[in-house]
Amino acid sequence: MNKFIICIAFACTAIFSPPLCAQQKILLPEARFKTGNDLSWKEKDLNDSQWTTIRTDRIWENQGFSSYDGYAWYRIHFYLPSSLIEKSYLKDSICFNLSKIDDADETYLNGTLIGKTGSFPESSSGYQSYYDVLRNYKISVKNSALKWDQENVLAIRVYDGSSSGGIYEGTPYISNIDLIDYVTLQQSAVKNNYTVTLKNSSHVFVKGRLTIKVLDTEQENDKTIKEISENINLQAFGQKTNTLNIPVNKRACLMASFVESHTGKVKELEIATPYILTPSSPATPKINGAKVFGVRPQSPFLFRIPATGKKPLHYAISNLPAGLSLDEETGIITGSLSESGDYKMKFIVTNSLGKAERDFTVKVGDLLATTPPMGWNSWNCWGLSVTEDKVKSSAQSLLDKGLADHGWTYINIDDSWENGERASSGDILANEKFPDMKALGDWLHQKGLRFGIYSSPGTKTCGNYLGSYQHEKQDASTYANWGVDYLKYDWCSYGDVFAQENDNSTSAYMKPYQVMEKALRDQKRDIVYSLCQYGMKDVWEWSAAVDGNCWRTTGDITDTWQSLKSIGFNQDKLYPFAKPGHWNDPDMLIVGRVGWGDNLHPTHLTPDEQYTHISLWSLLSSPLLIGCDISGMDDFTLSLLTNDEVIGVNQDPLGKQAKRLLEKGDWQVWAKELEDGSYAVGIFNLGDKTDTTEINWSELGLPAATNVRDLWRQKELNVKGNLFRTKVASHGVTLVKLER
C-alpha cells in the first residue's frame, strides 16, 4: 500500500499529487557507489564489487562523502520476477521510481538509457539542476533492456553542482503500472479550507470507494471530527472534489483513501495540516527580543526596540547614557559610546491601553553578537537571483508583518551581488542588480535594521562571483563605507589556494579568516563576523580566536526532514563552545517559501517538523536567519517566527547551548539552562508515528519543576514534580520551561 505524506503551505494554494507508480514493489534500499565520471560504468557486466555500498534514501554527504560535488555513479543490482505484473489489471508497463536526485541524472538499465532529468555541464544546454523533481521512469514490459527472472543492473549517473548530492527523500523502488496509478488524490488549500480532488487520468472507467477523514490528533487518543465516505464512479479523465474546513488552532490530520474495485488496490493521501499554537500578541504594550547588546567603543550604535501592541506606540528610556539618542516615535536608538563598561537602562513603551517596562544592558567592550543574530538571509529563498528590489521587499515586509517587533533585525545579502571586475583601484564593486550599496545600507539603517553582506576568502565565491582573496583590506573598508553590519565569509574557492599551499594544519584553516579578521578590526565600525566553512578542522575549537561571532558547523541545509534531522540532532558535542559573542551555526531556517532561485515552493517540512526546527535551533542558541520570501509569508510561518517565549530561549542572556540528556530509540530530550535558573526542555519524537512518552526529570539530572510551562502555547500546564507525560507527533516536539 502506498502512503504519501504531503507538506502544505497554510495561506496559499498548493496542489500535490503522488508519483505514478503502483503498489507491488521491488525495493532498492542500497547501491554500490563511486565518485567519478566514466560512461563505461553503465554496463551490466562491470565488476563493481569493490565500490562503496551506501543507502539510497539519503544524500551522499551523510554517508562519508561530505562536501563532494561533481559526478558519481550508483549501481543497483536487483532480481526482476515476472510475477510483478501477474496480479495487475493492466500489464503493459513498469515504473522505476528513483525518489529525488540532487541535481541531474541519467539512468541506465543494463546499459540502456531509460530516463534523464536535468542536464550536465558538458551538454549543449549547460548544467541544469532539477534536485526537487521526482524521478519516475516508465518503460514497456516488452523493452529489450529488461531481463525477466534474472539479475538486472540499474546504473545512475549523477551530477551535483553544489551543496547536497545524490538520491534522497525515500527509498527507490520498481513497480508495475496499474489502473490505480492513473488515479490521483490531490489536495489544495486556501487558508483552512482544504479541497480533496480524486482524478482519473486514464481513458477507461474507474470505480471504487472514497473515504475522507479529519482527525483531531492533539488528545491522547485521536478523534474523528469529520468524515465522508462514498462510492465513486469516475468517467475517463473525470474527477470528484470535496472541500472541508479544518480548525487552525489545533493539530489535525486530513486522511483520504480510494479503493479501486477491480484489484482492491488503494491510493492514499495523508496531510498534517498547519496549526497555529502561538497566541496573538496583546493590544497592550509588550517589549520583546534581546535584553543585552554588545558594541565596541566609539562604533556607530544602532538598536531598534522590539515591541508589540496597538499602534501608535511611544518609546522612552530611563537612564539613557550620554552619546545615545532615541527616536520616541520609532524606538530606534543611535549614537556611540566612548567608554567601556555595562550601561544599564530601562525601556518604557506606552500606548493608549497601557505601559510596559524592561531592563536592558548595553555592553561596551570587545564583544559583539552577545545574543545569536536574528534576521533574514537571501540564499535559501532567492539563491543567485537576488536583487535589490527583492532585498528591499523582504526588509519592508520584516517591518510590515511585525517581525522586527519581535527582534528580527539583520537583512543579509548572500552571493551574486558582486560585479565581474574590480575598479581600477582594486575596490570591489556591486553589479547592476545593486546600483547603490551605500544607499541601500542607509535605507536599512533608517528603518532600524542592520545590513549584512557575503564574500569568500578565495578568488571566487561559491556562485563564481568575485571573492576577497588578496583584497581583504580594501573589501573590509568598502563594507564599512557601505554601512555593513554583518559579513558571511564563505570558504568556496579558497580550497584551491589551500590545496596549492599543501598545508593541512589548523593554522592553515585559520589563515584566511585571520586575514579578514584583521581587516575588519581596522574599521571604525562593528561588523559581525560569520565564518562559513562547513565545520572543517573542528572550526568551533578555534573560531573565537579569529574573532568569529558564529561559524557554520555543517554543509548546507535543505528543506527535507533528513537534512534537518542529520544536521540539527548532531550538534550535541558542540555545546561547550557556544557562549555570548560566539555561536555554533547549523545553517539558516527552512520554513516558509524557499527555492534557492526564482522558482519558490512551500518548504517540504511538515508542520510538526517546522515546530521541531524552530524549537531545536532556539535550544541550540543558533543564529536565526529567515530563509524565505517574507513578502509572501503565510500566517502559519509568521506564527512560528513571532513566538516571544520560544525566541526568548534563543536570546537568553546566559548564552548557553542545550545539552542532549536522553537519546533512546526515537526519543531525544534536550535541555538548556536559562538566566533565571529555569530550564527550557525539548522532547523530540524522531520516529514515524505519533506516540506518548513519560519523562522523569530527576533521572535526566533536572530539578523537579514547581511548574511546567508550554512555550509554544504560552500557558501553564499545572504539572509539578518529577514526572511529565506528553503526546508528541511524528517528527514533532513538546517544548516546555521547567520553572523552579
Image: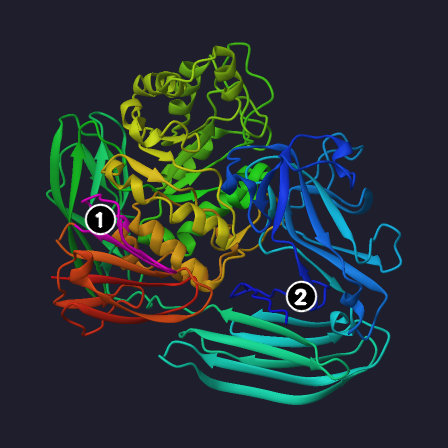
Magenta residues (range): 650-674
Q: CA distance from mark 1 to mark 2?
A: 43 Å
Measuring from the top left, give residue 20's x and y in whole percent. 73, 64
* Mark toward the start of the polypeptide (1 vs 2): 2
4 left or right of 480 in image: right
Image quarter of residue 307:
bottom left
In the rendered image, which residue does mark 1 sit on?
A: 652
Instruction: Tell which tag, 1 or 2, sits nearer the viewer.
Output: 2
Amino acid at circle 2 = Ser
Q: Amino acid at mark 1?
A: Asp
Residue 697 sits inside the magenta stretch:
no
Above/below status of 111 relative to 205: above
Q: Is residue 386 visible?
A: no
Residue at 89% over, 58% down? 142
Pick whichever, 664 or 127, lies toward us.
Answer: 664
Task: Characterize the local packing of mark 2: few (<14), some (14-19) or many (20 or more) Cα atoms within 10 angstroms.
Answer: some
Say which quarter of the image contains residue 604.
Answer: bottom right
**x and y percentages locating residue 623 in the rendered image:** 35, 42
Secondary structure category for the residue under label 1 = loop
Image quadrant containing the N terminus: bottom right
For disc 2, the marked residue is 17
Residue at figure coordinates x 59%, y 56% from the top left? 170
Quadrant position of the C terminus in the picture: bottom left
Quadrant of residue 227 within the rendered picture: bottom right
